[in-house]
Image: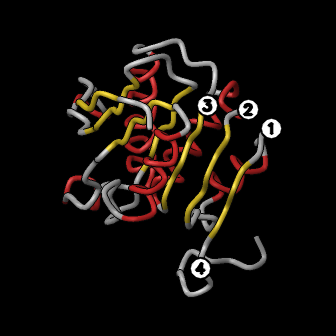
Amino acid sequence: MPEYIIGPLDITGFDNHPLPNRLFRNVGPARGLAVLFPGLRYTCDMPLLFYASRLFLNTGLDVLQINPDYTREAFSSASPDRQIDWLGGDASAALQAARQQRDYDRMVLLGKSIGTLGMSILLLHQPELRTSLTVWQTPLFRLPLVEQATQQLQAPAILFCGTADNTYDPAR
C-alpha cells in the first residue's frame, strides 16, 4: 500500500465560507486525483465513500474528500438556484485547490446523492473534465443538470442506485 500524508487544504468555498476537507497525498508520485463529493447526510467516513477512498489510494491516486455540511439552515432554506450555486461553488473551489497541489493528468470524480449535483455542475462548466472517470452513487436524475451532465460524458462511468431509493427513476 502506498504511503500518504493526510491533511486539510485551505479551501474557501461558496460565499467565502471555509470548506472542510481532507487530502490524502501520496508521498511519492501520484497516478492521478480522485475527488469525492458526499451526500447530504452521507459523509466520506461512511462505507461507500470510505472504501472507495481506500481503493483509489491503493491504486496510487491522491484523494480529496470534501466534507461540507449542507444540513445547515443557511443551505436548506436557500432557494434552489442559490443551492445550485453553492454546490457548484464548493465543487469548483475544491477542485481548484486540489489541482494546485500537483499537475494531475488523470482525474476520477465520485459523487453520492447531492454530491452528484455538485459534480454535474463541474462537468457542465469545465468540459475538459468530461474525459474523467466518474462514479455516480444514487444520482439525482430528477434534476435536469445531472441528466445533462451524464449525457455529455466522454469517458467510462459507473452509475448505480437502489430501486428503493427515492432518487431511483427506471426510465432514466
Mark 2 and mark 1 lie on one chain; the one further toward the N terminus is 2
The residue at the far bottom in this view is 164
Mark 3 and mark 1 lie on one chain; the one further toward the N terminus is 3
Q: Which mark is residue 125?
A: 3
Q: Are marks 4 and 2 in contact (CB under 8 Å)?
A: no
**In-image side of 78 versus 118 (left or right):** left
What secondary structure is found at the residue carrying circle 3? helix
Q: Which mark is residue 162?
A: 4
**In-image side of 163 versus 75 (left or right):** right
Amino acid of disc 3 = His
Report, in whole angstroms, how far the alpha carbon at label 2 lies from the one at label 3: 13 Å
Give the class, few, some or many, for how many residues have Cα within 10 Å of label 2's Cα (few <14, many ≥20).
Answer: some
- Give above or below for 168 relative to 133: below
Residue 146 at what x, y percent from top left?
63, 54
Of the pair 142 and 116, the residue shown nearer to us? 116
Report, in whole angstroms, how far the alpha carbon at label 3 lies from the one at label 1: 15 Å
Q: Are marks 2 and 1 in contact (CB under 8 Å)?
A: yes
Q: Nearer the viewer, mark 3 or mark 1?
A: 1
Mark 4 and mark 2 lie on one chain; the one further toward the N terminus is 2
- For disc 1, the marked residue is 154
What secondary structure is found at the residue carrying circle 2? helix
Mark 2 and mark 3 lie on one chain; the one further toward the N terminus is 3
Residue 26 at what x, y percent from top left?
40, 25
- Give above or below for 163 relative to 155: below
Amino acid of disc 1 = Gln
Amino acid of disc 4 = Gly
Q: Are marks 4 and 1 in contact (CB under 8 Å)?
A: no
What secondary structure is found at the residue carrying circle 1? loop
Quarter assignment of residue 124: top right
- Who's the residue at 19% across and 59% down the image? 73
Q: Which mark is residue 131?
A: 2
